[in-house]
Image (cartoon, helix red, strand yellow):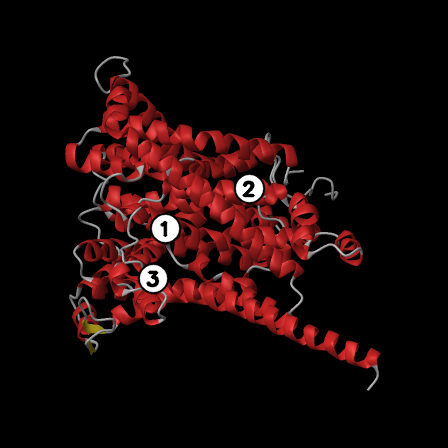
Amino acid sequence: MSSAQLSNGPNRFASILLILPSLAIIGVLFIYPLGFSVASAFFETGQFSFENFAKAIDFYSRDIVFTVVIVFLATAIIAVLSVCIAGYLTLGESVLAVAVLKWLYRWPLFIPFIVSAQLMRTFLAKNGMMNNILIEAGVMEPLQAVSFLDWRGIVITFVWKQTPFVVLLVAGAMAALDRTTIEAARNLGASKLRILIQIVVPQVGTTLMVGLILSYVTIMSVLSVPMMINAQTPTMLTVDMAWRINSYGDYGVANALGIISYLITGIVAWFYLRQGLKEGGAPK
Amino acid sequence: MTFGNANEMKLRNTHIVTTWVSNFVRYGILALLAFAIFGPIANMLLWAVAEVWYYPHKLPLEYGFSFWERVFREEGNATESLMTSVAIAVLTVIVSLIVAIPAGYSLARGRLPWRYLLLLIFLLPQAFPAVAVHMNIARIFYGFGLTGTIPGVVLVHALQGLVFAVWIATAAFSAVDPELEIAARSMGASKMRAFVDVTLPLALPGVLASAIFVFLISLDEFTGTFFVGAPDVVTVPMLLFTSSMEGNYQIASISSLILLVPSILFMFIIERFLKADVLSKVGA
């Protein structure tokens, strides 16, 4: 046999056969339920109608706004913090401080969402450790202590959990940058902040956007955090969907809310896919 | 002392002061960050060993392990849910690897049309808010008698882990030199033999990394279990959730700790397991 005949890898037919089972899982467990959710949102009443959407907007318009505000606010804070942390990791001059920061920042990345929610449920409570330490430190009077277990708690938990993920991606991209422009700017007397904003960040823009979009979708997906941090109204759409099903078995309205949350994510997911295809981050 | 020297000294003094101030700011910010990251974890650790703790006491009134005894004795709810969680996670890893190894090999070596598109399909479940899809999976599973069963939960977890399993397996197979397989084939080994004896062992570290990844995803998964498994399948995250909502923070914190330890261990070993040559090929 010649080595051409021995060419590595399966032929086209075998390749398709090998990938088929995994595609079947996606088809049966994802595409089909996805189609089901769309059908249910429009047809649950028996024939095609927007009734479920009318109800969803009627009952939950406050929660829709609440959800959009939370996701955008959390993503914006994650953006600022991750640029600061990754920027310091890249440009920081104190070797010790950089090493400490590097060791410190990534801990929440490996802590599951449900655990993060429980940690914050105790930490941010009225009698939680945060308030207690602020009172002990004399920053705050005992009577001023309030519970942060509302929209602030949700934002804090998501920022706490997702920032390290974006830092990991962004710091990696920053480390791969050509240092000569940075050094040149530094020699010309540019401040670190200016180097970060005008030279470093523009070059890692794509990575930053990808990290933020992935975080954004994650925030829209996680049920445990809003459920455990803030179960009262207004709350996030994820909680409304679970509530609609567990309490009323009302799949029509729940799925209409689902479609609305697809749309809120769809805008950025579309951007992500387009960016991915444009960059061709890969496949050759 | 000449005039010039005095000026120099003044300059040096200001320099020392500014260094001192910048160090103070630098380490002050690091300390705040450390508090923000470890404060919530410390609060959970306190709850895990608190016997009696109520408002307005800032620290537990009594410490002890009676809750640990209660949840870890035979028939205790933590022991039971830990067994359930581990069994589900192991089964999820098996299911994922059975489909991901062929798929990864095919994506790395095969002749697939629209390869990039196929890679993206596995990302789709991450691009949609999970709750909206999971509630419909639960509804479909109900028709097949899969709700409230271990196989049902395993399937949902496998869907969540599939993108990581397939992408990391693809990267692991891409990192193996194809020449080695050709060499084995030219010595008369069959395609299967060459794969099992040469390619698979070389790709094993990456495949193992993906197995650990999937194991942790399954261990921490909440949303899918909430819709498909509840109330019959009680995994550790479900135990955490119900005890936290009932206000039993000791049990919630102990189950948090059970979930936290494997994840933190993973943080320390991941860098050794996932070599840079594999990491650089993830998603490629």
Give the chain letter at badge 3.
Answer: B
Nearest to the observer: residue B279 or residue A210: A210
A138 and B222: which is toward the camera: A138
Q: Position of residue A173 (x, y in %)?
A: 64, 51
| Mark sitting on residue B259 | 3
* Element on which disc 1 rests: helix
Q: Picture coordinates of residue A138 (x, y %)?
A: 35, 69
The amino acid type, in three-letter code, at marker 2 is Val
Q: Position of residue A164 (x, y in %)?
A: 50, 55
Question: Where's the C terminus of chain B, which quadrant?
Answer: top right
SS label for mark 3? helix
Q: Earlier in the sequence, mark 1 or mark 3?
A: 1
- Residue A241: % across, % down: 26, 35
Give the vertical position of A66 relative to B204 (above or below). Answer: above
Cα distance between the residues tagged 1 and 3: 17 Å
* Residue placed under numbered mark 1 in the picture: B92
| Residue in view at x 31 percent, y 58 percent | A124
On screen, B199 above or below B265? above
The subunit letter for the residue under badge 1 reads: B
Which residue was labeled with disc 2? Answer: A210
In front: mark 1 or mark 3? 3
User: Could one spot residue A147 in this view of the protein?
Assistant: yes
Task: Give the amino acid type for the residue marked by disc 3 in the picture.
Answer: Leu
